[in-house]
Image: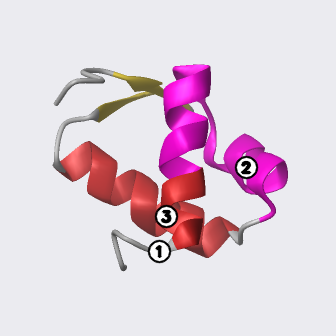
Amino acid sequence: MRLASKKTYRIIYHALENRHFTQLQTAKATGISLGQVNKVTQWLVKKRFVEKQKNNYYLADPSG
């Protein structure tokens, strides 16, 4: 995953705009593959920017 890529930026921007999201919703809204959305989302979870709650993700700490 390249943090500076346009696709990664669009996924992160979508998460910031929507605060609660699913990977499928993000993939459809951005036009990016579900696999790429999964990679970025898992990275965000690992860095604790996003937390998983059942099937949804929510923005835990937008400032990091």
Residue 24 on the magenta segment = yes
Q: Tags 2 and 1 in contact by the CB under 8 Å rule?
A: no
| Residue hosting label 3 | 8
Q: Residue at x 35, y 56 (%)?
A: 42
Determine crowd level at label 1: few under 14, some 14-19, many 20+ residues with C-alpha closer than 10 A: few
Measuring from the top left, give residue 61's x and y in whole percent. Answer: 24, 21
Residue found at the far bottom of this picture: 1
* Dot placed on the residue nearer the N-terminal end, 2 or 1: 1
Determine crowd level at label 3: few under 14, some 14-19, many 20+ residues with C-alpha closer than 10 A: some
Asked which colour scheme the image uses, the reply is secondary structure
Measuring from the top left, give residue 47's x and y in whole percent. Answer: 16, 47
| Residue hosting label 1 | 5
Q: Residue at x 39, y 24 (%)?
A: 59
> For the magenta stretch, what is the residue range?
11-31
Rendered position, 21 above or below 38 = above
Q: Is residue 57 left or right of residue 7?
A: left
Measuring from the top left, give residue 26's x and y in whole percent. Answer: 69, 46
**What's the amino acid at mark 2?**
Leu
Rendered position, 43 above or below 61 = below
Measuring from the top left, give residue 18's x and y in whole percent. Answer: 61, 23
Q: What mark, if any, has residue 24 been given in the picture?
A: 2
Q: Is residue 5 left or right of residue 23?
A: left
Q: Is residue 9 left or right of residue 22?
A: left
Q: Tags 3 and 1 in contact by the CB under 8 Å rule?
A: yes
Q: Residue at x 18, y 37 (%)?
A: 48
